[in-house]
Every structure is written in C-alpha cells, then in structure tokens.
Image (cartoon, rainbow, N blue to C red):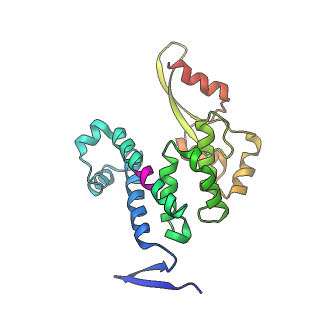
Amino acid sequence: MRKIFILFFGMSMLFISAQQNADLKKELDQIMEVDQGYRKLYTSDTTPEKRNEILKNLNIDQEEFKKRGWEMVAEHDSLNIKTIERIISQYGYPGKTLVGEPTNQAAWYVIQHSTKIGKYLPLIKEAGKKKEIPFTWVAMMEDRYLMNENQEQIYGTQGRGEMTKDKNGKEVFVNFVWPVKDLQNVNKRRKEAGFDSTFEENVKNMFGPDFKYEPYTLKQVLELRNKNK
C-alpha cells in the first residue's frame, strides 16, 4: 500500500505521495511559474496591477521588459528546455506519479513552447497513455507539431496570427484558425480526446467572442505568409 505524508501549513494541508520527488516537484514548479508568468504578461485580461505583481515576483525590471520582452521570453524558454531535457534524461517524463498535479504540466509547457516538439511528442503520447498527463495535452501538442510542419491539425486547438498584405498592398495582421483535417468531424474527435468544449467554443476562447471563423486551406495560410515576404 502506498504511504501518504500529510504536512500542515497553517490551516491548509499538503498531501505528498511517498513515490513523489519533492525536490524535483519544487524545481518544476519554479520553471512553470516563470514559463506561465512571462506569458501572462501578454494576456489581454491581465490587469495592470496583476502585471506589476508578476514582474515583481519574477524579478523582472519593467523598463528592460518594455525594451526586450519577447527576447527575454525566448531566453528563458531556451534555459528551461535545457533543464527539462536533463530531467527527462534522468527520470523520463515527470508525470503525475512522480511530481503530482498540476506540476505534471510543467515539462509539457516547456516542450510546447520549444522547437523540440517533434523530438518529444512520442514521449508525450506515452505519458498520455499511462495517464501521467491528460490526453487533451497530447492532442494540443500534436496539433502544434502538425501546424509547425505545415500540416492540417486534428483537434482544432491551434490558431495563429500573421502579418500579411491586403489587396492594396497595406500591411495588416490577420488572426486565423490553423486548417483542420476533416472539419465536419472535429467535435467528435475532441469529445473522444476528453475536451469539454466544442471546436466553435474553443475558437471564441482563442480569439474572443466577436471573432468570425473562416476555414482556411493550407494553400491559403501559406499564401498569407508569402505575401509578407
């Protein structure tokens, strides 16, 4: 029978399985805080007060962030993936059994935000089969990989924006959902994968309630890129 240790902190209780690695959990929690903290700085619903709080917690200088924000994000992403690769080489995927929830999402975030999805997607799929992570995370990473490879996505989780040119040659920014394979059955696939939202609801979540979805083909999205070259 698995032992459970109960630690008391004030009025709250923290349950730690004897199989879990507390030091690794702490390291991954810190990585996830940085990864998600930087991205919350760019989220439209993050209030100025919350943004200042994140900057303070992550020890980020406001002026430096204004000058080189995404450059700083890329630097931390590069450092984080190196750490995650070291952890994976030692433990395999740090999933629910090893570090608990929600810490089991930390490595997923870092890989999802890296250029190494193709390398680690098989590992992510295996972690999903073993229920170390939810299968919805597997689906999102597979869609991201397919998008990066200029292929149709399966579950309709990925959208993006591109600078392009309109018919008058003026530069415009266009948001769109990456092309979906067999679009008429996407909600069936999403339900089987465990998503609790429909494709249509997810589109609104990505781009806002006023976004008008227009299905693009692969040819069309590649043309959008080429117009800006």
127 displayed left or right of 43: right
Q: Is residue 18 above or below residue 143?
A: below
Q: Nearer the viewer, residue 111 or 136?
A: 111
**Is residue 158 visible in the rendered structure shown here?**
yes
**Is residue 100 visible in the rendered structure shown here?**
no
Q: Nearer the viewer, residue 96 or 185?
A: 96
Is 81 inside the magenta-drawn segment? yes
Q: Is residue 105 above or below residue 1?
A: above
Residue located at (73% from left, 40% from top): 183
Residue located at (60% from left, 22% from top): 223
How many circles with numbers are drawn on the protein? Answer: 0
Q: Residue furthest front?
A: 90
Residue located at (75% from left, 51% from top): 188
Q: Is residue 149 above or below residue 27?
A: above
Q: Residue furthest top?
A: 168
Q: Nearer the viewer, residue 227 or 187?
A: 227
Q: Nearer the viewer, residue 218 or 80?
A: 80
**Looking at the rendering, in which quadrant would you find the N terminus?**
bottom right
Q: Main secondary structure of the magenta part?
A: helix
Quarter-of-image position of residue 97:
bottom right
| Magenta stretch, residue numbers | 80-84
**Position in image of residue 96 (x %, y %):** 55, 68
**Position in image of residue 19 (x %, y %):** 52, 77
Quarter-of-image position of residue 57:
bottom left
Q: Is residue 39 above or below residue 179?
A: below
15 displayed left or right of 148: left
Residue located at (72% from left, 49% from top): 187
**Position in image of residue 146 (x %, y %):** 63, 40
